[in-house]
Image: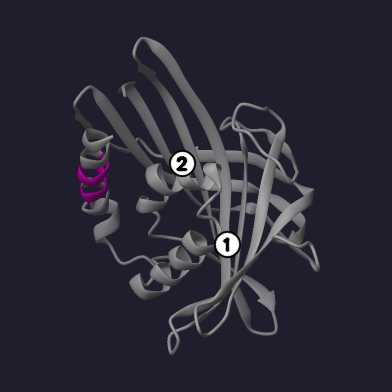
Amino acid sequence: MKRLTCLLVAAGLAFACSKDSMSVDPDAIDGRELAAVRSALDSALKDDSSYQILRVFVFAYVDRASRLPTGGGDTMRLVGVQLDIHATKADTPVVAQLSAVLGWRGYSAATRTVDSVMFVVGTGVTPPVSDTLRQRFSPDTAGIGTGFVIHQAPDSSVHAWLARAGALHITASSYGSGTSTSGAGLTITSSRGSVSGDYHVTAKLVPDSSSTVSAAAAFGGGIRGLQIRITGTL
């Protein structure tokens, strides 16, 4: 794991310093805003295995997100993320393919918190991905995903609602050639592009299910996308 962590750091630095990231980008995420989003996710989803996989392998590379107007002058930030692992460990194939959408709204520079974070994840990376959202999710089960709605208060405390119903659809994706970093038997390729689709989720409060919330977004015109592909020997 130590050598994988070192390689991820090196790959992240190479990706951040690529030519594309050096230009001015209106979808770039302010570092303090991104830290608030990650803090809310880490606090609310610390026990969720699918989030931990994406946190280690994908979210470290997220530095851009599209802006979608939601009415009343409000804006949601959205980014599609995909993880494609085709590796081996002790001669055993390790394969994982996950697609997720991360969204948030209501960032406060004064409190460095974000009002709402939405995170939905399913299996597969090749469109069409059409997953039903459920309370329980396994990366090995095709067609089933899960989702969370998170609220972060100005004092940084969080509450999370876990999916009971809903769907995630990835209808199209397109990526550039990417930036590759190799070492210790592994190659990590990071590619930017776009993802199209939609999601809707109905979720209940964790752990007591005392309240229900819903969230939805449609991005048929495409949002910022990020794909991480890992090959080699773990």
Residue 164 relative to residue 16: left or right = right
**Which disc, if any, is residue 103?**
1
Q: CA distance from mark 2 to mark 1?
A: 18 Å
Q: Residue at x 37, y 72 (%)?
A: 30
Front residue of 157 and 23:
157
Tell me the SS state at disc 2.
Answer: helix
- Kindly identify the amino acid type of the residue bearing the numbered disc 2: Ile
Residue 49 image position (x, y, % from top left): 53, 42
Name the image colouring: one colour
Decide whether residue 211 is among the magenta residues.
no
Q: Image quarter for residue 67?
A: bottom right
Residue 113 relative to residue 213: left or right = left
Residue 2 relative to residue 112: left or right = left
- Mark 2 = which residue? 53
Residue 26 image position (x, y, % from top left): 41, 69
Please give the range of residues in magenta.
Answer: 8-13
- Kindly identify the amino acid type of the residue bearing the numbered disc 1: Gly
Q: Is residue 106 above or below residue 82?
A: below
Q: Residue at x 75, y 55 (%)?
A: 201
